[in-house]
Image (cartoon, rainbow, N blue to C red):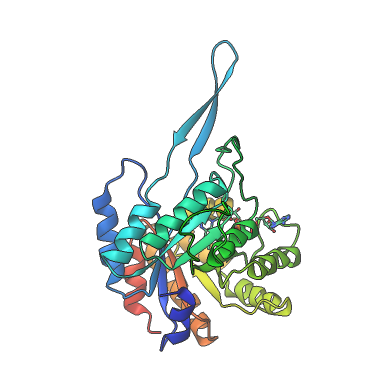
């Protein structure tokens, strides 16, 4: 079922989760027990992130520079297949521009359709150094709006090769990212919101926001989106603070603010950051639900410990 259908038909705002596939060589059992924990809360859908390979450049003794692939990040397709067909929860794989050619993206989408997956979240990704040389007529998507346009074309039965046999139209429901505190490369929020509109005009069916710890950012973002004619659902993305080190790593990685009150509480009692983070996320969730948000989406990533505590307290 499509994410937008889940939102439209739910009696109460549904709560969904986002997880990250294990690093290559990681233990699949850990992931399965994470999914076991999450499905108990009957999420309508679970997102699975996707990551381009990471590259480093090393200087050898003679001064020449060597490019090495440091880490590969497979797993998205396998985890989606399990979620969709073993757990019977709608899987939302993330699809990237960065590190993938349009031809690979098309193949990936064909695989997803074969697996009965109805949803994708289209994001650009960040530069991991893994730019592929585009040879033999291959092409790449630059911005998420280009990627959305490619998926929309497939939904209309238009594939990259005009003569492709059995080129059935797909029917993917397409999500995209939005940034209540603006994307770090955008000159200002207004211009960034115009970019979100371009993604919706290209065919995106809904928006999921980057995490935020102060609901005022979300409310202002939604208001601005509506003023710009964006009418699709805007799902708030939330993260529970679980460790003191995240007070610096989250703003550095995601370019979002952590409110003084939350940071002070975490610094004053580092042994209980999880409980402080859960209480904060609970207050955020309750206020968002009271404002009639379409649903809540939690960035769970690799551990269910904090979300289990929150779900025990949250009454939608
Ligand atoms: C809900 C969500 C899920 C995510 N999942 C993943 C994931 O699984 N894997 C991962 O690697 N990353 C993920 N990310 C992070 C994301 O890849 C980065 O934030 C990335 O830097 C931007 O992606 P985007 O899709 O928002 O890009 P875009 O919408 O392409 O925007 C990127 C920047 O370019 C600007 N821009 C857009 N179009 C144009 C244009 N035509 N001309 C000039 N400027 C333009 C925008 O204002 C913005 O500053 C996720 C982010 C969100 C919000």
Residue 193 location, x and y as percent? 70, 67
Which residue is more in the foreground, 234 or 92?
A: 92
Q: Which image quarter is the C terminus in?
A: bottom left
Residue in the image at 36% along x and 59% along y? 80
Confirm whether residue 259 shows in the render: no
Residue in the image at 46% along x and 51% along y? 107
Vertical placement of residue 194 versus 229, above or below: above
Q: For this view, does 268 lie left or right of residue 65?
A: left
Vertical placement of residue 218 versus 188, above or below: below
Toward the bottom, the furthest residue is 11
- Ligand 1 quadrant assignment: bottom right
Which residue is more in the foreground, 157 or 276?
A: 157
Q: Which image quarter is the N terminus in?
A: bottom left
Confirm whether residue 312 shows in the render: yes
Toward the top, the furthest residue is 62
Residue 19 location, x and y as percent? 39, 59
Q: Quadrant of residue 31?
A: bottom left
Residue in the image at 53% along x and 82% along y? 293
Vertical placement of residue 279 versus 103, above or below: below
Residue 237 location, x and y as percent? 51, 68
Residue in the image at 55% along x and 38% along y? 130
Residue 140 location, x and y as percent? 61, 46
Q: For this view, does 146 lie left or right of residue 155?
A: right
């Amino acid at each position: 079922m499509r994410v937008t259908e889940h939102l439209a038909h739910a009696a109460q705002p549904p709560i969904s989760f986002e997880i990250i596939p294990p690093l290559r060589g990681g233990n699949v059992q850990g992931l399965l027990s994470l999914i076991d924990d999450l499905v108990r809360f009957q999420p309508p859908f679970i997102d699975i992130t996707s990551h381009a390979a990471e590259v480093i450049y090393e200087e050898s003794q003679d001064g020449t520079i060597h490019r090495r692939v440091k880490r590969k990040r497979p797993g998205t397709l396998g985890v989606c297949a399990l979620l969709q067909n073993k757990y019977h929860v709608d899987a939302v794989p993330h699809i990237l521009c960065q590190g993938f050619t349009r031809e690979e993206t098309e193949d990936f989408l064909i695989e997803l359709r074969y697996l009965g997956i109805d949803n994708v979240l289209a994001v650009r990704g960040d530069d991991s150094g893994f730019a592929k040389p585009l040879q033999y007529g291959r092409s790449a998507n630059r911005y998420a709006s280009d990627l959305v346009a490619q998926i929309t074309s497939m939904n209309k039965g238009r594939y990259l090769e005009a003569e492709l046999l059995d080129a059935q139209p797909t029917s993917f429901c397409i999500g995209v990212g939005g940034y209540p505190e603006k994307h770090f490369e955008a000159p200002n929020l207004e211009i960034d919101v115009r970019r979100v509109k371009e993604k919706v005009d290209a065919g995106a069916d809904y928006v999921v926001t980057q995490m935020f710890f102060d609901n005022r950012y979300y409310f202002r973002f939604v208001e601005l989106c509506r003023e710009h004619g964006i009418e699709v659902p805007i799902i708030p993305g939330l993260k529970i603070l679980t460790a003191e080190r995240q007070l610096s790593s989250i703003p550095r990685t995601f370019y979002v603010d952590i409110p003084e009150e939350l940071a002070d509480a975490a610094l004053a009692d580092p042994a209980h950051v999880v409980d402080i983070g859960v209480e904060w996320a609970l207050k955020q969730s309750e206020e968002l639900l009271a404002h009639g948000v379409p649903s809540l989406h939690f960035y769970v990533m690799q551990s269910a410990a904090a979300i289990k505590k929150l779900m025990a307290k949250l009454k939608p």
